Image (spheres, rainbow, N blue to C red):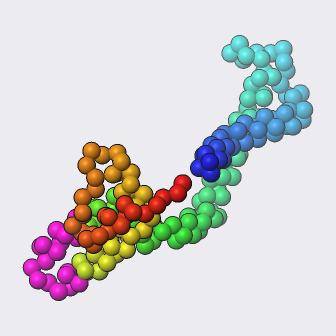
Amino acid sequence: MKKWFMRQYWRLQQSQTLISMVFWCTTLTLLIWPYVSWRFQSEKETLGIPMTYWGLGSIAVGVLVSVLIVGYIYDMIFALWKEQRTVDTERNPFGTYALIPANIVQIGMMNHLLRDKADGDEKILATCDWIDQWLAWCGSQEIWARSQHFWDSEFSSKVPDLFFLPDDAVEKARKVKLED
């Protein structure tokens, strides 16, 4: 239920940009029109369109361009949203210290290949050991259990004991009770 409400809220936010531009244009056009309407004689036409419509359209385009210029200047000079993105990334565990399940599988396989090609290099093997610990931690998190439950139910064969995770990681993930 919460996801459904969040999706609706997200949809409102997405449409808000377009709707607000329409409101900006129509409101300001109709507010400005009484002050400049005397310049556009309604009896005259250009390209078969009465001058009144040319005047209203030019005001609306002017408002739209003005709002876009203010947005561009705000973005390029003040750029306050860049810091917000940094904070968002720092708060996102998958942008800092955690891995999504697909990345766990990829990094696990690459780590195994790197270990095989290490030729006894202690630095490489120490790094591989550390990555094994990180993968084991990531494999013990709830998101791994969620993905594994999905994979187990959707594919014809269940997730095998993955060679880059601890021996009991796959079985432990199966035992996790998920609540949505």
Residue at the image position 38 percent from the left and 54 percent from the top: 149
Residue bounds of the magenta highlight: 109-126
> 75 or 165, which lies in front?
165
**Res 168 → quadrant:** bottom left
Residue 49 shows in this picture: yes
Q: Is residue 31 above or below residue 46?
A: below
Number of numbered labels in the structure image: 0
Q: Main secondary structure of the magenta part?
A: helix
Q: Residue 88, how many percent across, how many down?
A: 56, 66
- Residue sitting at x 25%, y 71%: 167
Residue 54 place in picture, x, y as percent: 75, 25
Q: Residue 18: x, y in percent?
A: 66, 39
Quadrant location of residue 47? top right
Determine whether 160 is above or below 60 in the image: below
Horizontal arrangement in the rendering, residue 175 relative to residue 68 (left or right): left
In the image, taking residue 58 as reference, residue 107 lies left or right, namely left
Q: Quadrant of the C terminus?
A: bottom right
117 part of magenta stretch: yes
- Taking the magenta stretch, the answer to whether it contains residue 118 is yes
Question: Is 143 left or right of 90, judged from the image as shown?
Answer: left
Please give the name of the residue rendered at 60% of the width and 66% of the height, measured from the top-left corner.
84
